[in-house]
């Protein structure tokens, strides 16, 4: 999961255990993009990030 999302294993573990909340929009977008979540499920949040940064696929080296 850490490799897919670009988020650290420790951060993901804290999310899973409830010790940390996912409130940072950049982290949310990283997680969704790393999991290759369809834009239809993410709404405008991921679309905005795609247009601003060249897209999470490009940033994470993922195929489109």
Image (cartoon, rainbow, N blue to C red):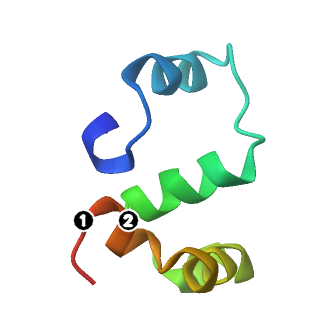
SS at mark 1 in the image = loop
| Foreground of the two, 32 or 7 | 7
Q: Residue 46, percent across and down?
A: 62, 74
**Local crowd size for mark 1, using a 10 Å CA cut-off: few (<14), some (14–19), many (≥20):** few
Residue hosting label 1: 61
Taking 59 as reference, is 12 left or right?
A: right
Residue hosting label 2: 59
SS at mark 2 in the image = helix
Q: Residue 18, percent across and down?
A: 66, 19
Q: Which part of the image, by quadrant, shows the N terminus?
A: top left
Q: Which part of the image, by quadrant, shows the C terminus?
A: bottom left
Label 2, label 1: how far apart the Cα atoms are: 6 Å
Residue, x 46% and y 79% (percent of image)? 38
Location of residue 50 by image quarter: bottom right
Check the image and name the residue furthest to the front.
53
**Local crowd size for mark 2, using a 10 Å CA cut-off: few (<14), some (14–19), many (≥20):** some
Taking 26 as reference, is 55 left or right?
A: left
Q: Are marks 2 and 1 in contact (CB under 8 Å)?
A: yes
Residue, x 55% and y 74% (percent of image)? 53
Residue, x 33% and y 60% (percent of image)? 60
Against 10, is 55 above or below? below
Q: Which mark is residue 53?
A: none
Taking the image as drawn, is residue 36 in sight? no
Number of numbered callouts drawn: 2
Q: Residue 5, percent across and down?
A: 38, 47
Taking the image as drawn, is residue 39 in sight? yes
């Amino acid at each position: 999961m850490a490799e897919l999302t670009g988020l650290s294993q420790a951060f993901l573990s804290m999310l899973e255990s409830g010790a940390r909340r996912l409130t940072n929009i950049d982290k949310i977008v990283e997680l969704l993009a790393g999991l290759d979540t369809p834009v239809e499920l993410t709404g405008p949040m991921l679309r905005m990030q795609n247009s601003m940064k060249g897209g999470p696929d490009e940033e994470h080296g993922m195929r489109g």
